[in-house]
Image (tube, helix red, strand yellow):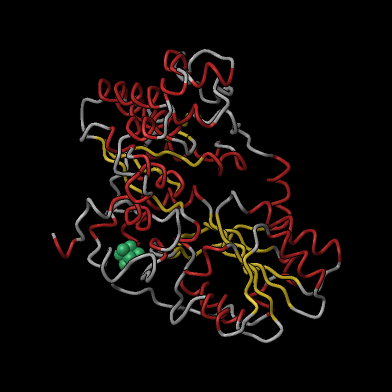
Amino acid sequence: MPPELAGNVLISNWWLHRGGGAGRGGSTAATKSGHDHPVATLDAPAPVRDRRPPEMKFVDEYRDAKLAEDYAQRIARLVTQPWTIMEICGGQTHAIVKFGIDSLLPPTVALVHGPGCPVCVTPLELIDKAIAIASQPGVTFCSFGDMLRVPGSRQDLLAVKAAGGDVRIVYSPLDAVKVARAQPDRQVVFFAIGFETTAPANAMAVFQARQEGLKNFSLLVSHVLVPPAMEALLGSPLNRVQGFLAAGHVCTVMGFAAYEPLAAKHRVPIVVTGFEPVDVLRGIHQCLRQLEAGRAEVENAYGRAVRREGNLPAQALLQQVFRVVDRKWRGLGTIPQSGWGLREDFADYDAERRFGVAEYTAEEPAECLSGLILQGVKKPHECPAFGTRCTPEHPLGATMVSNEGACAAYYRYRRTNLKPATAA
Ligand code: SF4
């Protein structure tokens, strides 16, 4: 099936098309895991706040069409009024759009897409800083691949590479440390973006560089934190979010205790969940169950990876290397205490200081509505530029660049079904 059509099909059709379900020999869960069919998890007692890992073990089990349909039916029976739920993470947005999860829900349940795509929320001026650093002679600039195509004010990192700059895609910040070790005559910079998920590896890279005494390694840091962004969204006059799906990988690192004051203060249920279709549907079901019951608690529907306290050694490393700072988010503006920057102890490894780009500023293109999309106020196809002046080949905004960006996901999986706003 062409990938651009896959998202237009209900999970059940998609599953049958790929030869799954009974056609592959009955319940995959039973045959692969040796446990009962995962539908049994639906009949488990109501989820507790920090649930132990469920019975399922293999990724196919989290894509089981029958289980997904059962969740959808339970949701349909449960819902008595309109609700709006935001999935925080771009990975969840991608899964929802790709697998058509929203099409399984009653029309009264609206899913809106949150600011949890790291590429999407990295501010324009950080891209300009990266380009300025990468353009300098003697610099090797290392980054994850997505960032190379994000447009800055005038060009992107790919253009720097095309013009002869040493811009490299790496798969880990520790690869950038290796480059620094191998090339002591060059300044090696790693573009350290992302949420709490990617921060421990970046912290480890700079920690290791210092341990080794590497003087030619530095980080361009743009780390952002989820709870302050949720607080900002909930405090916005535009807010229409009544429940959240929190990102399982973020909570794997940080735990979920930090979400409890948010849930209590704003009377909003928050369910930690994963990224496969059944994960997402389970999270939606638990969130709706709370909304319908008038509860506002934090529940963990990703017990196979997340504990309330999170990963304590990773958190200790983060504390050692980073400090909480105000951070500008693309489309959302500056959110107080919403990011990490390097501690003074590690200031020698701060690329902004080393290359003198700390004071850069940039204005986002007025035409791009990504700020409203990242707040769940607009959907991508409601942007007049969607699919016309803005495409993945020629993106105007970051939400069209990243695989996790809502605009890119709608373009990839739904553009044949959705009319751009200008053509509506
Ligand atoms: S379609 Fe393009 S211009 Fe419109 S909001 Fe998305 S990224 Fe911005």
Q: Using the image as rendered, state which of residue 167 and residue 314 is in the foreground.
A: 167
Q: Residue at x 55, y 17 (%)?
A: 31
Outermost residue to the right: 212
Image height of 277 relative to 342, above or below: above
Q: Residue at x 20, y 29 (%)?
A: 81
Quadrant where ligand 1 appears: bottom left
Q: Using the image as rendered, state which of residue 139 and residue 316 is in the foreground.
A: 139
User: On the rendered structure, is 422 left or right of 155?
Assistant: left
Tell me the quarter of the image containing the N terminus. Answer: top left
Image height of 192 relative to 46, above or below: below
Outermost residue to the left: 424
User: On the rendered structure, is 256 left or right of 137?
Assistant: left
- Pinpoint residue 417: horizontal percent, then vertical percent: 22, 50
Residue 293: quarter of image:
top left
Q: Using the image as rendered, state which of residue 378 and residue 188 is in the foreground.
A: 188
Q: Using the image as rendered, state which of residue 344 and residue 328 is in the foreground.
A: 328
- Pinpoint residue 304: horizontal percent, then vertical percent: 58, 29
- Pinpoint residue 423: horizontal percent, then vertical percent: 15, 63
Image height of 195 relative to 191, above or below: above
Specify whether residue 81 is in view.
Answer: yes
Image height of 185 relative to 35, above or below: below
Tell me the quarter of the image containing the C terminus. Answer: bottom left
- Pinpoint residue 8: horizontal percent, then vertical percent: 29, 43
Residue 323: quarter of image:
bottom right
Q: Residue at x 53, y 39 (%)?
A: 248
Numbered label tally: 0
